[in-house]
Image (spheres, rainbow, N blue to C red):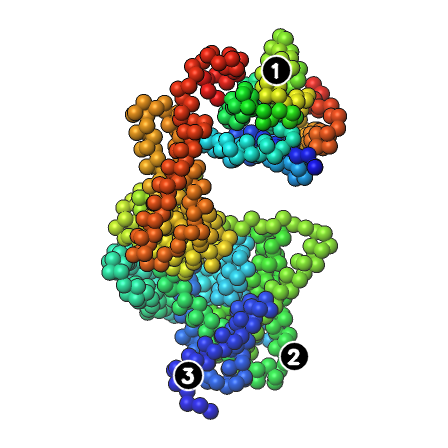
Amino acid sequence: MPEHNLLFEVMVYLGAAVVFVPLATRFKLGSVLGYLIAGCAIGPWGLRLVRDVDAILHFAEFGVVLMLFIIGLELDPKRLLEMRRPIFLGGSLQMFVCGVLLAVGGFALGLPWKGALVGGFALALSSTAIAVQTMRERGVAGAPTGTTAFAVLLFQDIAAIPLIAVVPLLAAGAGGHGGGGWLGAARVAGAIAAVVVVGRYLTRPILRMVARTGLREAFTAFALLLVVGIAQIMAAAGVSMALGAFLAGVLLASSEYRHALETDIEPFKGLLMGLFFIAVGMSIDFGLVASRPLVIVALVVGLLAIKLLALRAIGKPLGVAPGDRWLFAALLAQGGEFAFVVFGVAGEAHLLPGAWDALLTLVVALSMALTPFLLLAYDQLLRLARRRGSSRPDDVVEDEGAPVVIAGFGRFGQIVGRYLFASGIRATVLDHDADQIDLLRKFGFRVFYGDATRLDLLRAAGAEHAKLLVLAIDDPDASVRLAEVARQHFPKLRVIARARNVSHWVALRKRGVDAVERETFESALRSGRAALVSLGVGAYEARERADRFRRHNLANLEELMPHFEDEADRFSRARAGREQLEAQIAADRAELDRSIGGSWSAERDHEPKGERAPAESDPAHEDRA
Amino acid sequence: MARSIALIYAHPYPDRSRAGRVLLDCVRDMPGVEVRSLYDLYPDFAIDVEAERAALARADVVVWQSPFYWYGMPSLLHLWIEKVLAHGWAYGVGGTNVHGKTALWATTTGALESAYAPGEMHGHPFDAFVPAISQTAIFCGMKWVEPFVLHGAHRVDADALDAAAEGYRRRLEALLADEPLPPSHGGPPDA
């Protein structure tokens, strides 16, 4: 066996993830199952590349903390307040119904009533990690069903705290811990107050300071420090770290750095979540499965059946759409990661007799592994039902982001943004000027800090679901880069772009952006109109001439575009710019020659009304038509 | 050679039009029909005269389809006539470019046909409002055919609307085939 060091283990995890996750997604099994299989493969019952499974599981739980932080970032306090009914009513209903049914089941299997009670409620918990990841992959996270499921999961995270706390009390017999309870409550309150102070008052000024330094690593380091620190505060008070991180996320949800934080935390979250699923896969004790296969199959099936039916039944009072109730049940039917903790504590406290704690841990792990299969079964049944003709309307997926992303909110982007805003259209705005953002936010714009050319930030801003990207960055290089990123990664996203000059216009058009507007062209043309009017040309005629000038200018550019070179460096671009100007002036002159010989300017002064025979009967109310 | 139609469509809010859109949708895919939606092409009223004239040159039949506004055409279609059917191109010396082409006016009115009568809301029979338009076509040497009019566009029900659209399509088919025209659809019977 090779020497186990940290880098070797990292290599094993990354290697397993790279092999199994693409395979699993390829066969539409979802990434979660890929990680679980990877865990089985490298774990004690597979290749035995990893030994200390519990330590890994414990470390990887930090992925769940990061995930809750990101979820918090997406829920501002207002939306959370709107969700209080599903969280507290829906969540407690789910815990009560599932907990009682499972406890009765445990009691019937011969567990003592205390053990049955703890076991039942622990099994009633679902896996936030698996459910949320699955909902995201299936795109139901923003839909009403996803929101309800998330509310239930959130309540479970809250409920897990007293559940874990009550185990030693039950084991020690009745009461006697009153004083400790008060002290504990004070510590919890203190920790929550600390998180609120940090999240609400300290973080934003510090983030602003760090952002001004312009050092990305510093920003990333601070983002991680924030979550780790909050997790530590909560852990010190004995409260769920994930809940603390969630709270901090909610407090920062309305901050301008929301997207930047999300972007920086996301890769860490993704990797640690993967590690968490791998660890769950590794923790499946196949030795135990082999020794008591029937018992285990019966327990897993029993757990899933009771939870599925109970969840299906409470779907109605929770307001889940009738067609979605089985989906809702399948998403939440598995056991949760908190159950591992509860069984561990309960085993130590001798609340669960014999091998029950190991057995139930295994059952929970297996139920997690079965979730992707439950959903596949759900899909198959749905397809069958649809084929039978019982069609139901598609869910209206509540888009998580705004339909428009505006990149760059300087002089140009602002006008576009304000115009859209005035027309009642929401836009997510990205800009990298921290001072500018502060100012705009005072006026209530949804402006976020970050370098808009970064793919991950675009993604966080909702570019995948947006219809439109307004590319209003003033730096032509960055603008062209963003156009490339958008075309490559979001081919359905329509891009409307600002061009600094003709060279920039050409560069964007050659990259497939069809709606490009030169930033000074329209305003300069209006000034030209004003000049003509000042010289005595009629206002309407001046407008028509401007329309005509614009049309010919655009036709010219389109015609010349293939000949204009797409210059990479500024120096040759300046040279190309001069050539383009020359070509355009030549075209303007040709147009003037044509029009003097043709229909417009020269005709103004020929033949006053009525001099010529046809004019007498001319139906057009002018001296010329 | 197969005949073709230039369908000049003018509705300021095509998305909000009810009858006009159904009529248009029923004919827009017909082979030989080129639809030019003026308010989509020229939201700034900056009509590309050359492009419009090129479209007319390609067509044997010109259809003007629009709602009936203030006893005539919507302003952009009126502007189109001013700019495109100009002196020296559509009439006057050398203005023979639309000579011999067929002109059809297809319009939809909000009111019922009965409102177009002396003493009623609109004071005159509908036919009284047609000459300004028919004469425009005739002045340019075009062949005027009986207009297609759908009255009561606001209240016509879906079936009647579909029937009207079918009638519209048959008329365009006849024009493409250069056959005698089926009669115009008069809209829902008066209540």
Q: Amino acid at mark 3?
A: Phe
Q: Quadrant of the C terminus of chain B?
A: top right
Mark sitting on residue A8: 3
In the displayed structure, does residue A452 sit left or right of residue A309? left
Do dots 1 and 3 share one subunit?
no
Q: Considering the numbered disc 2 on the image, is that residue within a helix, a strand or a loop?
A: helix
What is the distance, in whole Å, between disc 2 and disc 3 at their CAs?
37 Å
- Using the rendered view, name the quadrant where residue B35 is placed: top right
Identify the residue under disc 2.
Answer: A294
Residue at left 53%, top 71%? Answer: A22
Q: Residue A61 in the image: x percent, y percent? A: 43, 71
Closer-to-camera residue (A576/B40): A576
Q: Considering the numbered disc 3 on the image, is that residue within a helix, a strand or a loop?
A: helix
The chain letter for the residue carrying disc 3 is: A
Q: Considering the numbered disc 1 on the image, is that residue within a helix, a strand or a loop?
A: helix
What is the distance, in whole Å, between disc 1 and disc 3 at their CAs?
91 Å
Closer-to-camera residue (B141/A551): B141
- Using the rendered view, name the quadrant where residue A233 is placed: bottom left
Q: Farthest residue toward the top?
A: B119
The mark lying in front, picked from 1 and 3, is: 1
Pointer 3: residues within 10 angstroms few (<14), some, or many (20+)? Answer: some
Identify the residue under disc 1.
Answer: B131
Closer-to-camera residue (B104/B112): B104
Residue at left 36%, top 47%? Answer: A580
What is the distance, in whole Å, between disc 2 and disc 1 at their CAs?
92 Å
Residue at left 54%, top 51%? Answer: A397
Q: Residue A531 in the image: x percent, y percent? A: 30, 29
